[in-house]
Amino acid sequence: MNIEDSSFILLRQHRLFRQLTYKECSELNIVSGFMNKKKNEFVYLNSLRNDRLYFLKKGYIKIGTYDKEGNEKIKEVLSQGDIFGQLSLEGDTGEGEFAQVIRSEANICSFSVEDFEKILMKRPDLAISFTKLVGLKIKGLQSRITSIIYKDVRARLIDFFIYMAHKERKGNEDELSFKNYLTHAEVASLVGCTRQTATTFINKLEEEGLLEFSRQQIRIKSINKLEAQAD
C-alpha cells in the first residue's frame, strides 16, 4: 500500500469524509499535507498560519492565543478525529491563533481551503455535513463561554470534566478513566481562572469523591453523580 492509499483510508475514517471517493481524496492533495509533530511543537503560529484545514489523526492539540503580556489563553483542546484551522473557509481570521501539540506526538493531515471548496462545490451533501459539524463546534464553544460568564469556578470545572468524560466515553459506563494530557494551568485557562484557584477546586472535587486528577490520568468515579452536581 502506497502513501496515497494509506492517506485515503486514514481520511475516510472520519465521519465527515466517509463520503469521499478516491479521486476526490487525491484532489485534496492530503499526502503533501501529512505531518508528525512532537510535544510542544506548533502546527501553526500567528503569521505562520496558512489557509488550511487540519484533521487530527493521533495525539492532542491545544488551540489558543497570547494576550498583550504574552500570557497563553487556551480556547479548546482537541483530540483524535477533531478538525481545526480555517473552519470558516473565509481566509485567515485566527487573530494570532496558535495550534500546539501537548503531552505526546501528534499525527496530522491537512489540505487547503481552496481545494476543499472545489470539492464542496461538486458535493452539496458534503457541504451540508461540514456545516453541521462546524455548527456543533460553535455550539460547544458558546456553551463554554456561557459557563464562564454565568457560573462560579466550581461549576465551570464540573462542566469541563463532564465535557471531557463524554468526549472520552465509548459506551454508557458510569465510571470512566482516561489519559490526562492537561496541566492544572491549562485547565485553569480553559475554565477562566488562575492556576491556584483551579488546583484548589480540583482538590475539593477529589475530597468529595467525584474524581481523581493526576498527571497520568483523570478518573471520573460517577458521571451521573458529577452531572447531578451541575444541575
Image (spheres, rainbow, N blue to C red):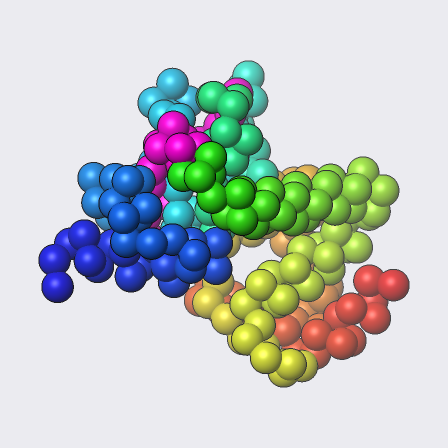
Q: What is the x, y in percent for residue 185?
A: 55, 45
Q: Residue at x 47, y 35 (%)?
A: 121
Name the outermost residue toward the left. 2
Work out whether 219 lies above or below 122. Answer: below
Tell me the quadrant of the picture where the C terminus can be found. bottom right
User: Would you say 55 lies left or right of 8 here?
Assistant: right
User: Would you say 230 lies left or right of 182 here?
Assistant: right
Q: What is the x, y in percent for residue 81?
A: 44, 57
Quadrant of residue 111 in the image? top left
* 102 drawn magenta: yes
Q: What is the x, y in percent for residue 159?
A: 73, 57
Q: Can the viewer see residue 227?
A: yes
Tally of numbered discs? 0
Q: Residue at x 72, y 41 (%)?
A: 142
Quadrant of residue 52 in the image? top left
Q: Nearer the viewer, residue 2 or 54?
A: 2
Q: Residue at x 18, y 52 (%)?
A: 4
Tell me the quadrant of the picture where the N terminus can be found. bottom left
* 162 drawn magenta: no
Q: Nearer the viewer, residue 194 or 94?
A: 94
What's drawn in magenta, residue-wise? 94-118
Q: Can the viewer see residue 130?
A: no
